[in-house]
Image (cartoon, rainbow, N blue to C red):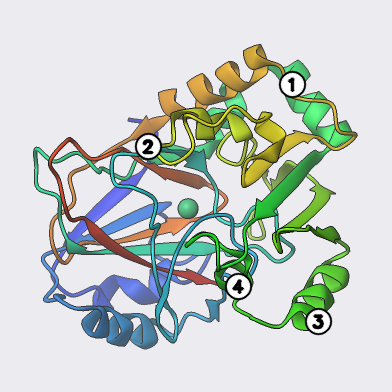
Amino acid sequence: MALTCSLFYGSPRAVWAGAGRPHGAVTSRVLLFRGLPIRTREDYARLFDGTGLAPRDYVGHAGRREQLDTNVYSSNDDPLEFTIDIHTELSFMPAPPQKVMFCCIKSPGEHGGGETPVTDMRGVMRDMDPSLVERVRTRQIRYVRNIADKSRSSWNWQSNMHSEDREEVERFLTGKGFSYRWNADDSLSYWFSTDGLSEHPGSGETYWFNQLTEHNGSCFKVHPEFMNETKHISEFPRHTSYGDGEEFSEEDLAHVREVQWKNSYGFHWRQGDVLVMDNFMVGHGRMGCNPGVKERKIIASITKN
Ligand SMILES: [Fe+2]
């Protein structure tokens, strides 16, 4: 197994100081703490506060999630049967998070599916077609959002932007250098281009750092709420293309997905599990839950350091 994943039973205090430093005693890219006495989001919030890590907000995120506590969010509110493609968190935003933390409050069970794959992004970089890497490096990636008003969908710009105020949203978008448009149905479209590769803030190593596939409209062709819609993939809530607007070919999308999933490893969640990932070195996604599974509750935090 190429990915270093350390599993700790019991208190994380003994190892935490090392995990929080890029060159500390713990060098793992993924830490899984198992057997912690965490049953509620309040329990997890206390643990997160105790780490001393600096929380980062999710404003402008790509998915559907709810803020549950000051620094705690639902991991994703898409239908449980939907499989979420591999990605690195907020890798399209300035100052992306350096760590991603998940905590299992309610497991779907060993036979329920819903595993969180963790992905060796060093392996992804090694296996990616060098010509595609070069095209992404020179042409960047354009990210497009088409987000409904809250009167029309639970997936709306108000929750995405953490604001009901259009002027505040416009200040946020303008401040990031994003282009935007308010549409006749009160939905918001915005788009921007950014690098698809990034240097690790600690080591300087270059990583495949983007949401080229998870953000691509093709994902919605298998999304339970969108799969019967006939519109162009660029009109779905998320889409990606090259920075100049040219679509990625189906072959390129298939190649990226194959490389990312080939370098991924999964595990069954147990209640109280806490997963900590280096967001540059480790990607993540979600396996869809099996039919009949009604509940899977994973909560999340992201950090600046
Ligand atoms: Fe994510």
4 vs 2, front mark: 4
Callout 3 crowding tier (Cα within 10 Å): few <14, some 14–19, many ≥20: few
- The percent position of residue 289, horizontal first and vertical second, equals 23, 40
Q: CA distance from mark 3 to mark 4?
A: 12 Å
Q: Which residue is mark 1?
A: 132
Q: Which residue is mark 3?
A: 167
Q: Amino acid at mark 3?
A: Glu
* Image quadrant containing the C terminus: bottom right
- The percent position of residue 20, horizontal first and vertical second, equals 45, 71
Q: Secondary structure at mark 2?
A: loop
Q: CA distance from mark 1 to mark 3?
A: 39 Å
Q: Amino acid at mark 2?
A: Thr
Q: Which residue is mark 2?
A: 83
Callout 4 crowding tier (Cα within 10 Å): few <14, some 14–19, many ≥20: some
- Give the label on residue 68, or none: none
Q: Residue at x 74, y 26 (%)?
A: 133
First reached walking from the N terminus: tag 3 or tag 4: 4
Whether residue 305 can be seen here: no
First reached walking from the N terminus: tag 3 or tag 2: 2
Toward which corner of the image does residue 68 lie, by quadrant? Answer: bottom left
Q: CA distance from mark 1 to mark 2?
A: 25 Å
Q: Residue at x 58, y 24 (%)?
A: 256
Q: Secondary structure at mark 3?
A: helix
- The percent position of residue 91, horizontal first and vertical second, equals 64, 52
Q: Amino acid at mark 4?
A: Gln
Name the side, left or right, on which 143 lies relative to 74. Answer: right
Name the side, left or right, on which 129 lies relative to 109. Answer: right
Q: Amino acid at mark 1?
A: Leu
